[in-house]
Image: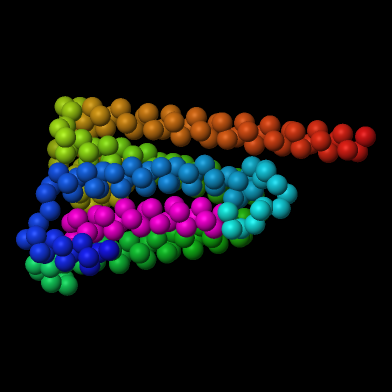
Amino acid sequence: MIFALGIGLNAAGGELDDKVADVIEGVSKLVAAVCIAQLSLKIPTWLGIYPKKHEIMLGEDVTQRELWFNVAWNIWREVAEIGAFLIPFFLDEGAEAIPLSGIVGLLVGLFCGALIYAASMLLKDKRKLCIFLVVITGWLSMGLFTGGCHEIEEAVGETPKAWKIKGDFWSKSKFPMALFKPFGYTSSPTILWLVCLPVWAIILVTLHIIKYQRAKNNSEKKAAEADAEKV
């Protein structure tokens, strides 16, 4: 996909309209936000905090398919961004255009994944791990949703900025604050940005409460059925 898009861009002059690029990135972030929100909602069940609908999961296939879906959509997001922003530069400037940050990001991702896996294997009480992962994935989903809406907003016309913090330290494109950009940070939020962040947070919290109540009701129903069978 990357090479096909790169060849097409090169044939078209190696350029991509800024508005089209913003919309591609915005839509991809919105899709990623939904996928990561799904992960956040499913973590308590996967870690055994919420009771499963069946004593034996209808196998790991369902979970594996869900994982494949979420991973595939997030890969699409990254591919869209790479195709839109890296490939034209790569074709013009050469292989040095591939940023070192990509390699660093891969290593950090592998390290975090290994750390989470080790924690899930070693910790007997997984509730703290569950809360941590739910908060992190939910927070990331909020940031992606807000960022996606802002990208589309830039293409169609921005709402007024609420405030602007000056200084390189606070810039969302420079270290260290760039680390918080995926989680919804910006030094100059627009009105739409400030609306989207809490709205998506409220939606996520509401969905978690609904899922908790359903899991609780299912657990109580199973307990009642078990008591009735004993009688």
In the displayed structure image, the side of residue 129 where residue 177 appears, left or right:
left
Residue at position x 72%, y 37% in the image: 219
Residue 107, x across and y down, in percent = 37, 66
Q: To which quarter of the image does residue 23 belong? A: top left
Q: In the image shown, does 104 or 5 lie closer to the viewer?
A: 5
**Which residue is more in the foreground, 185 or 214?**
214
> Where 79 falls versus 45 (above or below)?
below
> Extreme right residue here?
231
Residue at (37%, 53%) from the top-left corner? 74
Nearer-the-camera pick, 131 or 151: 151
Quadrant of the frame with the C terminus? top right
* Residue 72 is one of the magenta-drawn residues: yes
Give the image quarter of residue 143. Answer: top left
Residue 190 vs 85, above or below: the answer is: above
* Residue lying at 32% horizontally and 31% vertically, measured from the top left: 196
Residue at point 68% right, 32% down? 217
Q: Position of residue 124 (x, y in %)?
A: 66, 54
User: Which region shows up in magenta?
Assistant: 63-87
x and y, in percent, of residue 225 in the image: 81, 35
Q: Is residue 72 left or right of residue 117?
A: left
Image check: 75 left or right of 14?
right
